[in-house]
Image (cartoon, helix red, strand yellow):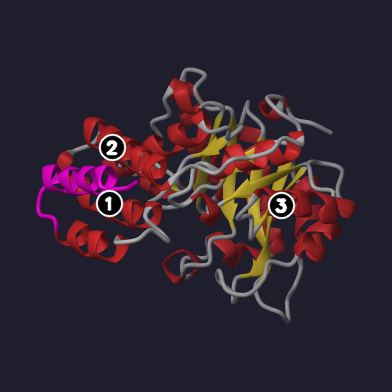
C-alpha cells in the first residue's frame, strides 16, 4: 500500500528528522541530490502550544524542500491534536504529513514520558495516535525503535497498535532506546514489523551507502528507507542510493566538489538565518571534510572562528587549495 506523499519514487528514500541538523537549508540541499521526502526537526507540541518562537521557526517549510512532514513530540493527546489542527490551518498546503516522534532516546525527552518512553506504555501511545489521527486532515505516521531495551523488544506489538489507532505509516529504527546509536541496527525486527502490518513501513538505521539501502530493502521488504547519520556532510548519499536503485553506475564527488557544496551550504544558512547562529555550521563543515587531507587543522580553525565571515573564508580557502 503506497501513500500519495511518497509517489515521487518507489521505493522512496527519505531524510530523517534530526534535531539541530535537518533544518530547512539542509533539507533543501538533500532534495536537490535526490531525497524524495523530508521531515522537519522534531517540534515540541507543548512548546508550540505555549507560543515558543524557537519552536515556531522549526515549522517553516519552503517549496524547495517539499514534500515534507512536520515531526511533533509530546505525550498529551489534547495538546498534540490541537497543534496538528493549527499546523494544518497555517501551513497553506506546505505540509504533507504529520509524524509523531516515539523513538527519540535522549533523557531530556524520555524523562517527560515522550519519545521512546512511549514504547513502555503502548495504551498511552495508542491514545496519542488516535487523537492525532482523528484531528489531522493529513496522513499521520510515527517513528519508533526496536524497543526500550533488549528485555522489552516490542516493535511488532507497538506497530500493530499504531496501525489500529490510525497511523498511515510507521518508521522503525532497528535499535533499542538503550543502544542509542551504537551497535548494528537489527533489520530482522524491521522485517517482522513489515510482515505484521498492512500499512507502509520505512526502514531506518545504518544506511551509509547505496548498497546499505539495497540490503535494507531486500532483507526487510520495507516500503522505503530513511537516511539519518549517513547524510551528515554527505547529501550526495541520495544520488548514490538512487543510482543503486536504478542500477546505474555512481561516481562519488571529488573532495573539491564536496567542499563546494559545503561552502554553498554555509552561504545559504547565513543568507536565511541570523548570522549569530553561525556556530551551528561548525559540525556540518567538520562532516563535509571527513577523510580529507588537512581536515583536522581546518576543523580546529572553524571551531574557533569568531565571525561567520571568517568561517566562510576558511572553508573557501580550504576548497580552493584542493586538487
- The span from disc 2 to disc 1 (Cα, nearest Å) is 9 Å
Residue 318 drawn in magenta: yes
Q: Do residues under tags 2 and 1 come within 8 Å of each other at their CB atoms?
A: yes
Dot 3: element:
helix
Dot 1: element:
helix
Q: Nearer the viewer, residue 173 or 144?
A: 173
Which residue is found at the position 47% from the left and 67% from the top? 106
Per the rendering, the mark at residue 211 is: 3
Q: Is residue 132 above or below residue 94?
A: below
- The span from disc 1 to disc 3 (Cα, nearest Å) is 31 Å
Per the rendering, the mark at residue 87 is: none
Left or right of 191 on screen, residue 80: left
Say whether residue 167 is visible.
no
Q: Nearer the viewer, residue 98 or 316?
A: 316
Q: Which numbered disc flags the more N-terminal residue, 3 or 2?
A: 3
- The span from disc 3 to disc 2 (Cα, nearest Å) is 31 Å
Q: Do residues under tags 1 and 3 come within 8 Å of each other at their CB atoms?
A: no
Q: What stretch of residues is rendered in magenta?
A: 305-323
Disc 3: CA contacts within 10 A as few (<14), some (14-19) or many (>=20): some
Per the rendering, the mark at residue 280 is: 1
In this view, the residue farthest toward the bottom is 151
Q: Which numbered disc flags the more N-terminal residue, 1 or 3?
A: 3
Q: Is residue 187 above or below residue 143?
A: below
Instruction: Identify the residue under disc 2.
Output: 269
Amino acid at each position: 500500500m503506497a501513500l500519495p506523499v511518497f509517489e515521487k519514487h518507489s521505493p522512496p528514500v527519505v531524510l530523517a528528522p534530526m534535531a539541530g541538523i535537518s533544518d530547512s537549508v539542509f533539507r533543501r540541499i538533500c532534495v536537490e541530490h535526490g531525497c524524495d521526502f523530508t521531515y522537519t526537526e522534531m517540534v515540541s507540541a507543548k512548546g508550540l502550544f505555549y507560543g515558543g518562537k524557537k519552536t515556531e521557526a522549526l515549522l517553516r517549510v519552503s517549496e524547495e524542500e517539499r514534500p515534507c512532514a512536520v515531526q511533533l513530540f509530546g505525550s498529551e493527546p489534547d495538546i498534540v491534536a490541537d497543534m496538528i489542527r493549527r499546523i494544518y490551518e497555517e501551513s497553506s498546503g506546505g505540509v504533507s504529513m504529520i509524524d509523531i516522534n516515539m523513538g527519540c532516546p535522549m533523557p531530556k525527552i524520555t524523562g517527560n514520558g515522550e519519545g521512546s518512553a512511549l514504547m513502555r506504555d503502548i495504551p498511552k501511545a495508542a491514545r496519542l495516535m488516535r487523537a492525532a489521527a482523528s484531528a489531522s486532515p493529513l496522513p499521520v505516521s510515527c517513528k519508533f525503535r526496536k524497543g526500550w531495551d533488549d528485555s522489552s523488544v516490542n516493535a511488532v506489538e507497538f506497530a500493530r497498535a499504531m496501525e489500529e489507532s490510525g497511523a498511515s505509516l510507521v518508521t522503525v529504527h532497528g535499535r533499542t532506546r538503550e543502544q542509542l546509536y551504537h551497535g548494528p541496527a537489527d533489520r530482522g525486527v524491521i522485517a517482522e514489523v513489515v510482515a505484521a502490518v498492512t500499512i507502509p513501513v520505512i526502514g531506518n538505521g545504518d544506511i551509509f551507502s547505496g548498497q546499505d539501502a539495497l540490503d535494507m530493502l531486500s532483507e526487510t521488504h520495507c516500503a522505503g528507507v530513511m537516511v539519518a547519520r549517513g547524510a551528515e556532510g554527505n547529501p550526495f548519499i541520495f544520488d548514490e542510493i538512487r543510482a543503486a536503485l536504478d542500477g546505474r553506475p555512481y561516481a562519488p564527488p571529488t573532495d573539491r566538489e564536496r567542499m563546494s557544496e559545503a561552502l554553498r551550504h554555509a552561504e545559504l544558512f547565513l543568507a536565511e538565518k541570523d548570522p549569530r547562529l553561525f556556530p551551528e555550521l561548525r559540525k556540518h563543515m567538520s562532516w563535509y571534510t571527513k577523510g580529507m587531507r588537512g581536515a583536522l587543522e581546518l576543523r580546529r580553525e572553524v571551531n574557533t572562528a569568531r565571525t561567520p565571515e571568517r568561517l566562510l573564508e576558511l572553508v573557501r580557502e580550504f576548497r580552493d587549495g584542493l586538487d
